[in-house]
Amino acid sequence: MTTTKTSPTSRTTTRAFRCSAALAAGGLLITACSSSADTDSGQPGAPSFEGRGPITYVAGKDTTGSVQPMIDRWNKQHPKEKVTFIQLPTDPDAQRRQMIQNAETKSDAYTVLSLDVVWTSEFAAHQWIDRLPQERFPLRKMLKPVVETAKYRGGLYAVPGSSDGGMLYYRSDLLKKAGVSQPPVTWAELKAACAKVKRLPEAEDMSCYAGQFQKYEGLTVNFAEAVNSAGGTVTDAKGTPDVDTPEARKGLDFLVGSAKDGTIPAEGVTYQEEDGRQAFQAGKLVFLRNWPYMYGLAANSGIKGKFAVAPLPGLNGPGASSLGGHNMALSSFAKNKATALDFIKFFTSEENTATQLKEASAAPPYASQYDDKALTAQYPYLPVLKESILRAVPRPRVVQYGDVTAAVQQHAYAALTGDKSSAQALKDLQAALQKSVAQ
């Protein structure tokens, strides 16, 4: 059901004025917005969360097939409050655009939104999602870095449904046969290990390494990881752009140099997550940076028992993943918000996040699940994943995230494809981010 009219419930939560979300002087930090919406649930001006009936759940395409069965369980238990699953494209940028378009028209077609963790601040600042009552959810049982991704200016605007940390997938069978006893901890070790593996007759046609280097959100993730893993940063703690530095250049130089020397195959600059997964499973790659979702898929492929995972390598030691995952938020323009809150609590429960772990290799938000002996025996990657999440660095949490990620993609991709030097790309990126600050 799609309409551009504002529902009665959403009208009661309309703010006294529009938040301007101005950028902080000299930085990209989100500034305060004077609005009654900043009060806790139950205070004057807070969302009422009333209404029961059908709702929608909006997320990227479910490539694992695990989401609809959970919704089916809900629908069987709540025949008068059924949830319709609306699947958007797999491309995160396309997902974000469609969600924003829906919000800008104040449509009630979307109820519960599965937001990439980095979108939470943007959607909250623009008042596209409601502030949620923290006491309704078991946040203290969750990993603290994961919960922080769901907050904006101290308020809870979403509930973690899953977390995510990048891991290094590697062909353990080939490393062992080549005499490499441990997975690489540094970039130099990765290249040295690959050189040994490629001396094996069965590996001479394999490529060394891939990640997500196509010109989309995945490139922002991989670029930020390279910069952070070399001791640099995209924006500092205050949100000020700080990417034109020697440290950041070392990170970008690793990616650019790897593309030039063949460590990253030529087709690697076209890879998104699924492209890399399929190449790794087909025996085309020795190493792959990817999310935990692919572990279960790879374990059921032709390389079952032949691969393992390790923390991402860095310049001088273990690297830093970008913090990923998805938070469940409630559209400010939705109807049946009481049902929506109950569905969010259902979907993000320990039971259902454990199901997502088992069926989709999705990183759970609950701390206890990483230390559960039965789970770690079944999913040996959990300790590596926990380390990845706890060491992870958030992408810039800014209102103007769309401008930031577009600039990163433009200039990092130009460097990867040889259109610019690393130095020029970082100089141009710094200028682009500073221009965003000045707007």
Image (tube, helix red, strand yellow):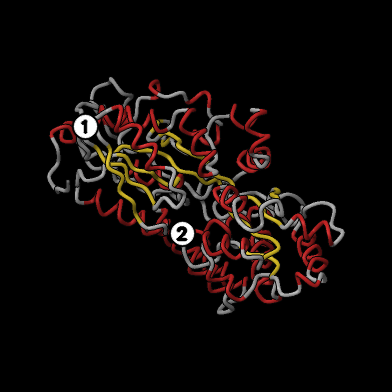
Farthest bottom residue in view: 419
Give the mark toward the camera: 2 or 1.
Answer: 1
Residue at x 60%, y 53% (from the top left corner):
298
Considering only vertical position in the picture, is 201 above or below 306?
A: below
Determine if residue 428 is in view: yes
Q: Is residue 121 above or below residue 47?
A: below
- Quadrant of the image occupied by residue 177: bottom right
Which amino acid, by three-letter code, is at mark 2? Thr
**Looking at the image, do the residues carrying marks 2 and 1 touch, with CB atoms under 8 Å apart?**
no
* Image spot of residue 427 (x, y percent): 56, 68
Return the x and y of residue 39 as percentages of the image width and height. 31, 26
Q: CA distance from mark 2 to mark 1?
A: 34 Å
Q: Position of residue 291 (x, y in %)?
A: 57, 50
Looking at the image, residue 414 lies above or below residue 85: below
How far from the left and from the top, in percent, is residue 250? 69, 63
Pick the front one: 260 or 110: 110
Q: Quadrant of the C terminus?
A: bottom left
Specify the label residue 405 is tagged with.
2
Q: Which residue is mark 1?
A: 336
- Which residue is more in the foreground, 314 or 80? 80
Helix, strand or loop at label 1? It is loop
Q: Nearer the viewer, residue 170 or 68?
A: 68
Q: Is residue 438 visible?
A: no
Question: Disc 1 marks which amino acid?
Answer: Asn
The structure residue drawn at horizontal position 61% and vertical position 55%, both measured from the top left corner, is: 225
In the shown orientation, is residue 109 left or right of residue 154? left
In primary-sequence order, the first of circles 2 and 1 is 1
